[in-house]
Image (cartoon, helix red, strand yellow):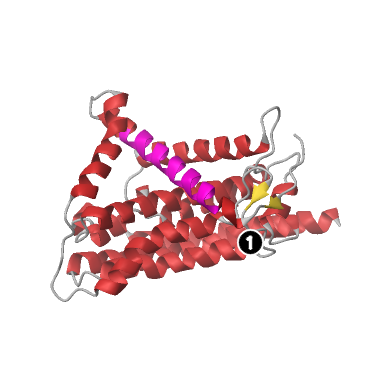
Amino acid sequence: MSPVDVTQVPAVWTPVAAVLLLALAGAAAALDGAVAGRAEGRSWRAGAGVPWAETARLLRQRRRTTVAADRLLWQVAVAGLLVTALLKTVVVPLGSWTLSDLPVGIVWFNAMDVLVWALVWLAGWGPNSAHSLVGGYRFLGQALSYELPLMFALTAPAVAAGSLRVGDVVAAQQGLWFAVWMPVAFVVYCVAVAGFAAWGPLGAPVGTDVAGGVLTETSGVDRWLLQAGRWALLTAGAAFGVALFLGGGSGPLLPAWLWSVGKTAALLAAFVVARRHLPTLRPDRIAPAAWLVVLPLVLVQLLVVSVVVLGRG
């Protein structure tokens, strides 16, 4: 595999990054619809069209209003998830290009994840509705479970590369991806991505048992923005995972940017398929496993990485 040197591009490329992020998120939504349609006996093509039909319906639908809603905070939450997903991607290299080559890119990504806590809770608080507020608190409950293991999972590649700069982490994987010798950190990271996107087994904040949770009172373009934000967060998480654990844009024959897109699409597809085979977990049942099993395991992983780095001198 040829080495990939990451360089920062001008800010005028930000709209291109946003379009690419939404395109990948839309493709993942179409795949999810196709898989769900196939499971219900419909054709792949009919299933793939469901998300686009739902988008058209929501964009025509009138916004729902509730009594004594905190409209300002509600709107901040509705638009905030999509913006946060884009802010996460500014430090993710696309092959040899990145929008922001921050020396603390990993810290930036994690900080944006903490911002998601506030936004999802505000999406539950804003409508002044019991069901949506329960969904917001559910998200905080499961975030307390996945956030600390996620922080140590992000620390492992940084320790191995000796840098918090994402480009340095990509460069340190020439010859061997970090996912190969940091499997625990990689798995924990993937689970955390499902957590901050409220996705699959960690989708309790939008669960049907609380009538949709934080989505209960949203409709029309507001509901579309929240759902698009969740898909965009999942996509941003997959793209960052490729940079941290799967070698970024390194690979034979094809351009580096195409390797980055291809690996991100493959990891997204894995998320979509896994969702159909895993049950939704209750936040109160996630906490014991996260603190008593997952956290010690990822700490051992970090210890192993540190010993290997010290051994290399």
Label 1 sits on what residue type? Gly
- Looking at the image, residue 146 sits to the left or right of residue 158; the answer is left
View extreme (front): residue: 12
Q: Which residue is mark 1?
A: 105
- Looking at the image, residue 263 sits to the left or right of residue 160; the answer is left
Residue at 40%, 36% (x, y): give it.
Answer: 273
- Looking at the image, residue 169 sits to the left or right of residue 32; the answer is right
Q: Quadrant of residue 50?
A: top left
From the top left corner, tell me how far across and down residue 186 is, in percent.
57, 49
Q: Range of the magenta residues?
A: 14-33
Q: Residues within 10 Å of mark 1 (few under 14, many from 20)?
A: many
Which one is in front, 138 or 297?
138
Which one is in front, 231 or 144?
231
Picture quarter with the C terminus = bottom right
Residue at 27%, 67% (x, y): give it.
Answer: 124
Q: Quadrant of residue 1?
A: top right
Majority secondary structure in the magenta region: helix
Query: What SS does tag 1 mark?
Result: helix
Q: Quadrant of residue 303?
A: bottom right
From the top left corner, tell me how far across and down residue 241 is, in percent.
57, 48
Answer whether residue 43 is visible to the viewer in this image.
yes
Residue at 60%, 52% (x, y): give it.
Answer: 92
- Looking at the image, residue 270 sits to the left or right of residue 258; the answer is left
Q: Is residue 162 above or below residue 53?
A: below
